[in-house]
Every structure is written in structure tokens, then in C-alpha cells.
Amino acid sequence: MASAVKKMREEDVENYDKRRFCMAILGLCVADAYNTQITLTPLKITNCNAASSGGACFSKAFCDTESFDEGMVLGDVFQTGIKTLKNFAKNGTLPEERRMFLAFDKLLNFLNGEKSIKFNNPQNLHALPETELAVLVANHLMGKLAISSCFLVDKNCTGKRDGCCCGVRSCRMTGEYGDTSIGNLEVWHGHLDMIVNDDLAVGAIENPPDSSGEKSTVEVKANLQRNPKIIAQTIVFSFLQKKRHPEREHFLTPCIGIGNSELIILFYDSEHDVLLESSRVPLFESSVSCKFSYSSILACWLVVNYKIFCSGLVEEFKICKSNFFLHAREKINIYKDELKFQNVNSFQSNEPKLVKVASKVKTSPLMHETEKTILEVLLSLASADAYSNSASGSNSN
């Protein structure tokens, strides 16, 4: 029965664009040469109010950071997931382990579907307030890629609706509104915009208003990265997950930030005190498209299923300390032992600034091996096309 299901899945998946799928895999594994690359930069905290007197809600959090010189590719913290993608791209092999198979089946279903949000005018989609866009992405992307499609939306958010804000009557919201507050009133605390499957924090990065009503591209993009609110939420959520799930093999916990039709992924390891921030990932194929980019599809698939596919920190990056333990030393025991989920207070706001990324990006042997394999697959696809075109030309003569 299982083999029959697997065979059906392999035949079914031919509807997807294999070249773009392979290029998106390369973007997870290769440090340069591809526009779709997603890198991770370790951050060091230079100043923050994580231990300020009286605590601070996420909207009032400040956290100045600087980047380490060396970074890594996203695939190196998802080595289990990369092996799964590589094996499928090379020879159609599907994972045997049940949870991996269920998660991969979700990906195949999504790739075979429309991969888009039904909006009559794409410009209206890209002009949505960030919170509404984040809910749309959760309902139309994250919820469809996770084994469970449940998510919790902050009940205090603006633009609350009974159904999905895509406007399609038949589109059902798989999430619900509720209390998403985390933390402790003595330290960083507040409401997350969303929690996916009780395991992944999602934050909407609202663009601050200005007098002219317009924002430069640099201001908008800088607002998404090094955002103190998202950094604070990521750190608090990681400590909370470690407290709630001490049995996990590692405690590298992700958080997704969404703003200006892009997303970033932050990670914090509350055991090794390492903070990572990804490069920006375009949500859609273009500024006039409602179709999700292959890069965002694969990145979100890995992140929403991180309990299955995340391999934890690469050993050499465990020394890239964020120094959060140092800055929060007076209240570090509160972060470790006294954080709560729900029934905690908060608000929201942020401020843009220019950012610096890692100047060098390292990759593991697995990433090099995956690059070689995927390039071979792409070469075979190109050869097959050349042969097909040649045969067509001969027949026409």
C-alpha cells in the first residue's frame, strides 16, 4: 500500500516546474552565484533592554546588533530536510519515516496546486496591511505546508475577519483568533502576531508611517531586518519552547517575520546563545504576481516543519555567541524558568535602520554534495530538452 501511494505521488508531481524546484534547492545550499540564495548571518547583541527594570513589551524592545563576518546557508541548519529534497530531485526517492513522508506529501500537493493566492488585482494583494498579509500567508502557504494546518492569530490584531481576507467565499480559515501572549512582565513580553501549530512564531513587520506617506526601498527593507521586536520575540519564544519541550535534541528555534511582500527567518538557540538572521526571501514571483516564489515555498516548508527537518547548529557556529546571556544576566533565570504562554500583556512598534550581513558564507560538505547533485539533475534536464528539440527539428524536415 505504501509503495503504491509513493508511486502515485512520483507520477503526480510531474506537474511542477522541476528546474525552478532545483534552483530553489540550490538557493538553500550554495553561498554564491545564484540570485535565490538564502544565507544566515550570526548576530552579536551590543545593547538591549532585555533586563530593564519593570520589563519591556515587545513594542518597546530595543536590541542593537552587529553581524559576525562569517555566515552560513539556510540548508546547513536543515540538513535532514536538504537530504530529503536532494534524494527526491535526483531519483524520485520519498522519505520512509512517517512524519517526513506526511510533510513531504504536503509539499508535493502544494507544488502540484496553484501555488498562489486568488486575488483579482495583484496590486491589492501587495498593498495589504502587513498583519493581513501575514494571516494570508499563514492560511495559503504555511498552513498548507505543515502537517497540521492550525494556527492562532492575535485576538487584538487590526482587520479581524470571520473568513480568510483573500475574499474568496469558499476559502476557509484554518486558524482562529486567541491569546498569543508570551513572556513575563519582568522581562520582554507581549503578543505574537501568530503562532503556527503551537511551535512557530510569526511576526508582521508594520512599516512606520512618515510625513510624506512614501518610503524608500532601503527604509522598507531595513525595517524588516535587525528588527528589535522580532529579535525579542524570537529569543523569548526559544526560551519558552525549551522550557515546554526539554526533551528536544536541540533548541534552535525559528521565527518568521513578514513585511513588504518579503519574509525573513530568525533563529535563536537558547542553549548555546546563538542568534541567526536570514537574508530576505521574496514571498511572490514578482511585484505583480500572486504566485508564491519557489524560494519562499521551500523555505517555509522547512521552517514550519522544523521539528522534523531542522538539524540544529553546525558545530563551528556554536562559538558565535549573541551575548544575550551577558546582557540579560540579572534576569536570565526568569528567561530560563519563569516565562509563560498566554495571559501576559503587550503592544507593538519598530524603527528601521541599515544593516550589515556576513561578508563570508561557509557551507558544509553536505551542501557541496547537494549542489553537485542538483546541477547534474539540471544538466540532464537541459540535455533532454536539447535532444527533444533536435528530434522535433528532424521530424519537421
Image (cartoon, rainbow, N blue to C red):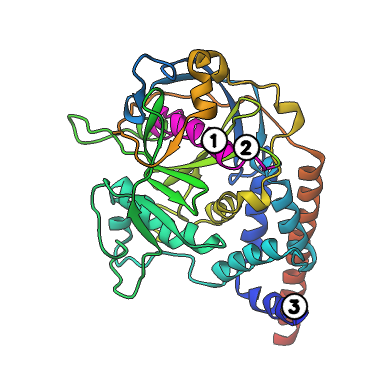
Which residue is rendered at x = 32% and y = 24% of the image? 60
Mark carried by residue 146: none
Observer-nearest of 244 and 230: 244
Task: Give the Cα distance between marks 3 and 1.
Answer: 36 Å
Q: Quadrant of residue 391?
A: bottom right
- Mark 2 and mark 1 residues within 8 Å of each other at the beta carbon: yes
Mark 1, residue position: 238
Which residue is rendered at x = 29% and y = 61% of the image? 165
Q: Position of residue 25 (x, y in %)?
A: 67, 52
Badge 2 marks a residue whose secondary structure is strand
Which residue is rendered at x = 31% and y = 34% of the image? 345
Q: Position of residue 348 (x, y in %)?
A: 30, 33
171 sits left or right of 88 in the view: left
Would you place residue 67 above or below residue 261 in this image? Answer: above
Q: Main secondary structure of the magenta part?
A: helix
280 sits left or right of 88 in the view: left
Q: Earlier in the sequence, mark 2 or mark 1?
A: 1
Specify start and end residues of the magenta stretch as a single range: 223-248
- Mark 3 and mark 1 residues within 8 Å of each other at the beta carbon: no
Badge 3 marks a residue whose secondary structure is helix
* Amino acid identity at mark 1: Ser
Would you place residue 357 above or below residue 178 in this image? Answer: above
Q: Is residue 252 magenta?
A: no
Q: Nearer the viewer, mark 3 or mark 1?
A: 1
